[in-house]
Amino acid sequence: MADCNHDCSSCGESCSSRDKKSLLKKPHEMSDIKKVIAVVSGKGGVGKSMTCALLASAAQNSGKVTAVMDADITGPSIPRMFGVTERAMGSDNGILPVVTEGGVQVMSMNVLLENEAEPVVWRGSLISGTVLQFWTDVIWTGVDIMFIDMPPGTGDVPLTVFQSIPIDGIVVVTTPQDLVGMIVQKAVNMAQMMNIPILGIVENMSYIECPDCGRKISIFGESNVDAIAMEYGIPNVAKLPIDRNLTQAADNGKIEQLENNYLTEFFNKIMKKINKK
Ligand code: ADP
């Protein structure tokens, strides 16, 4: 463009000189965040927040300083799952995340609202702006690994988050009823556009386990998630059962106290993949 001033932050043109990295926002100057993993899904209600909370608990239990950024602004469920009830505090320097009983740093719309039940009826740009402030204005201290609970889908907000925060890898959450192939294809396309690796797929509500004989029953039929993961070269697949203990732990704010996390092994595998980068 003839009148290009090389300031890509104020220009919407996708010209060849646009440096993707130039859209990245710097975290708060007092923050220290080593790795960032985004947890995504094609639609709501498939267990994205559950997966995010289980991965964060697995990380914290393995001794890593862990954080969760709840970017699902209109449907925030992370604080409830971790039993966080207090509000976030500000300091002269910035906003401080709340800390769970187990030590996970959390920032979410729900720890900022005076009344948790208040709906957030905002336009996309305001929502994206808030998520970015979770990155730029919150002081995250000594974080080894941050999980971002993304808003569902591939709309405006996830796109802005992907362009603005340096994400090291993506975990895709689906269920057997989902059109898994299409959702993975969309995630793969988005990841390729952003040049971010997909670390693994979690198939949630994959089966139930018979309490008497322990047999795994695929109530929605056998899924094709393994074949799809292979097709797209996605290295890790985890299958999460429908388990009442998970619902109860999430509803009672005891996700960190779960005896069976289910995703510990998956977490170790994705960490190996991310550390190879
Ligand atoms: P999303 O973030 O994709 O909208 P959530 O993680 O909030 O979905 O899950 C939706 C509901 O389903 C929550 O009440 C959660 O506790 C429950 N849930 C999710 N996964 C499971 C599971 N594997 N077993 C039992 N309940 C689950």
Image (cartoon, helix red, strand yellow):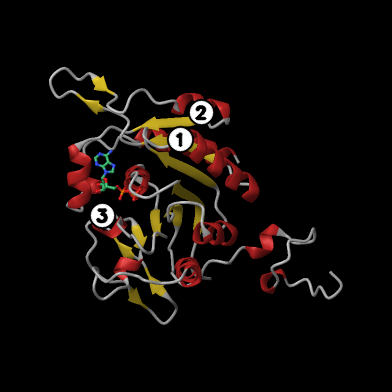
Earlier in the chain: of badge 1 and badge 2, it is 1
Height in image: 92 above or below 167? below
Q: Is residue 101 visible?
A: no
| Residue at the farthest left position | 212
Left or right placement of residue 263 versus residue 246 in this view = right
Height in image: 249 above or below 136? above
Q: Amino acid at mark 2?
A: Ile
Residue at image position (36%, 66%) is: 97
For mark 2, give the secondary structure.
Answer: helix
Provide the residue designation for mark 3.
82
Q: Are marks 1 and 2 in contact (CB under 8 Å)?
A: yes
Q: Viewer-proximal residue, 206 or 27?
A: 206
Height in image: 104 above or below 98? above
Image location (x, y in percent) of residue 144: 46, 52
Query: Viewer-nearest of labels 1 and 3?
Result: 1
Q: Which quadrant would residue 90 be assigned to in this image?
A: bottom left
Earlier in the chain: of badge 2 and badge 3, it is 3
Dot 3 crowding, Cα within 10 Å, few <14, some 14–19, many 20+: many
Image location (x, y in percent) of residue 131: 46, 66
Query: Viewer-nearest of labels 2 and 3?
Result: 2
> Disc 1 and disc 2: Cα gap in Å?
8 Å
Q: Amino acid at mark 3?
A: Phe
Provide the residue designation for mark 2.
228
Q: What is the count of numbered marks?
A: 3
Q: Is residue 191 visible?
A: yes
Height in image: 192 above or below 165? above
Provide the residue designation for mark 1.
180
Residue at image position (43%, 76%) is: 94
Image location (x, y in percent) of residue 266: 41, 34
